[in-house]
Amino acid sequence: MIDWRASIKLRMAELLAILLLTTAASTAGAEPLAPPDELGPFAVGRTTFVVEDPSRDDRTLTVDAWYPVDADDAVGVPPSVYDLIFAGLPSEVALDEPPVSAAEPYPLVVFSHGNNGIRFQSFFLTEILASHGFVVVAPDHAGNTAADLLFPGQPFETRDRPLDISLVITRMLEKNADPADPFFETLDGFRIGVMGHSFGGFTTMAMASGFQDVPPDPRVRALVPISPAVGGLSDEQLASVESTEIVIGGTADVTVPIVPSSVRAFELPSARPRYRIDVVDAGHNSFTNICDFFDVLLGAGIPQEFLEFLLGNADEGCAPELIPIEEAHRVTSLYTVAFLQRNLALDPRYKRFLTPGLSRFEPVEFFFVAGNQAASR
């Protein structure tokens, strides 16, 4: 177990270093760098819509989008509420459908939820990314959601997952080209990334490797597989992955252990650069908002036994022996935001967060491949 008091002291040293770097940038006239583990300069909006795929019997997906909002447009807008069927969870960050910031075209990131999960299962991450200037969209993989456990709906096959993500990318680019759409000219179609948790981590890698008869999607330029369940992908498929990536996992994950899952997803691809972050004492669900969902639904009177059926094993994120879930969220945000800012938004200043030296101040084990050389902390 990590000594969290010592970790906090080290974190204070890191924050001091960031402050000095940011102050230096401001003094030099550059735009201050927003720390990647804190909310960024934008307010955040959230909207929900539906997309259909006529080529798959009109397969229908519910999609959430989180996006940057200018400060003036956020005034007086009520919070967005996450619908948990039996209760609502108001967001502390996301607002209910304010206008999308038109300051510039933003990178697009698509999130894929876990097996029997839900599109907003990791809203801590989608919200912070939007605050840093990314448009983040997440579909429910119909037939493979938590709601399908209660109300079985559309048929589902594993190949539907990468097809769902490609469909969402296509629909978002169509919105970007439609003058009547709120997302008109807000996206940079050349900067597209995919991230996902567990089965969604598999989906993330499949977007670059292909799966069965589904080819890779060449529009995807950056990957963030989190606790990736890549057992369904062969060594050859993983070796074909060329999109830059950061693999994030938990050392206490017993559902999708780092060995072999994160190791295969990191070591086999040919991508340059690529990174692997092993979060010390994180469990499988430390990368989700499962504790928030559990608390809200338990408070609404839902029996704990039913919640465990509906949400899966909350202990893998909320147990006291694990890293505090707020700290797991912070570390995940730190590395995800920094990676996507550097490798998708192409801001070179964020490279400083993707180094072995800085990782010494974080509860992680850090690995990377740069050029033709591999190194680890």
Image (tube, rainbow, N blue to C red):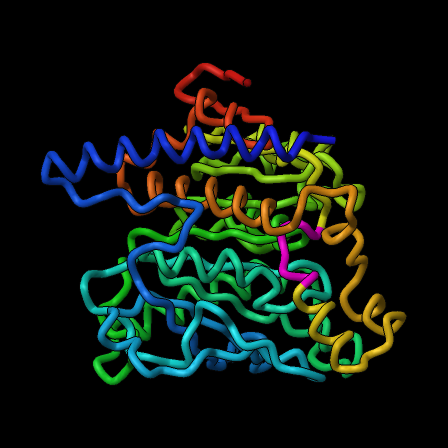
Quadrant assignment for the N terminus = top right
Along the line of sight, the residue nearer the viewer: 76 or 49: 76
Residue 297 x/y as whole percent: 73, 76
Question: Which residue sits at x=72%, y=82%?
Answer: 153
Residue 191 x/y as whole percent: 32, 51
Specify the quadrant of the image occupied by residue 291: bottom right
241 relative position to 154: left or right? left
Along the line of sight, the residue nearer the viewer: 2 or 251: 2
Q: Is residue 286 visible?
A: yes
Q: Vertical placement of 242 versus 128: above or below?
A: above
Residue 306 x/y as whole percent: 86, 74
141 relative position to 350: left or right? right
Q: Is residue 51 visible?
A: no
Quadrant assignment for the C terminus = top right
**Which stretch did the figure color magenta?**
285-291
Q: Is residue 286 magenta?
A: yes
Question: Which residue sits at x=41%, y=56%?
Answer: 129
Q: Is residue 141 magenta?
A: no
Residue 168 x/y as whole percent: 46, 68
Question: Which residue sits at x=51%, y=72%?
Answer: 91
Specify the quadrant of the image occupied by residue 84: bottom right
Q: Vertical placement of 306 versus 23: above or below?
A: below
236 relative position to 147: left or right? left
Q: Vertical placement of 288 versus 172: above or below?
A: above
Q: Main secondary structure of the magenta part?
A: helix
Q: Vertical placement of 35 versus 308: above or below?
A: above
